[in-house]
Amino acid sequence: MSKNVENSTKSNLTLENRQSLSITGIKKIRTTEPAQVVADLDNCTIVVNGNNLSIENLSVKEGNLDIVGSITSIRYVTSINKRWSFKNIFR
């Protein structure tokens, strides 16, 4: 196991009926839109796609994020640089 993984903060996802998603280990929110929520974890980024998505609860200090809406996909993106754009997500 690499040193980065050993020292990283754990994250957990709990998806309920594709209508409610709870995520722990959040470091930063990149964007929130009705069709997409993008957030940084310790060593990657998580992209949640769906319809009528909204943030129900957010505590960056505690690392908790709750999303409600119709969730259609959850994707991890591990390599992001400063020129990262959202069009790369849809490739």
Image (cartoon, rainbow, N blue to C red):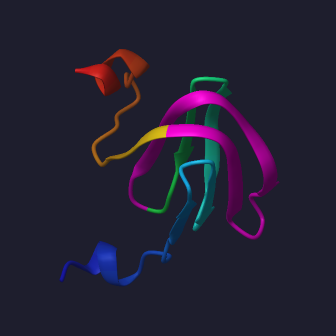
- Measured from the top left, where is residue 13 in percent x and y? 51, 66
Q: Main secondary structure of the magenta part?
A: strand
Q: Which residues are magenta?
A: 43-71
Q: Is residue 81 above or below residue 6?
A: above
Residue depicted at x 31% and y 76%: 5
As drawn, 18 above or below 12 = above
For this rendering, which residue is in front, 87 or 33? 33
Residue 53: x and y in percent read: 67, 33
Instruction: Report the residue at 51% width, 72% height from top.
Output: 12
Q: Is residue 40 left or right of residue 77?
A: right
Residue 51 drawn in magenta: yes
Q: Residue furthest front?
A: 17
Quick one: which residue is furthest to the left in this view? 1
Decide which of 41, 36 is in the foreground and name it.
36
Quarter that holds the C terminus: top left
> Residue at horizontal 43%, vertical 75%?
8
Q: Which quarter of the figure has residue 72? A: top left
* 86 displayed left or right of 63: left
Tell me residue 48's x, y (percent). Answer: 50, 40
Which residue is at the front of the view, 58 or 81?
58
Q: Quadrant of the N terminus?
A: bottom left
Magenta run includes residue 41 = no
Number of callouts in the render?
0
At 40% from the left and 81% from the top, the residue drawn is 7
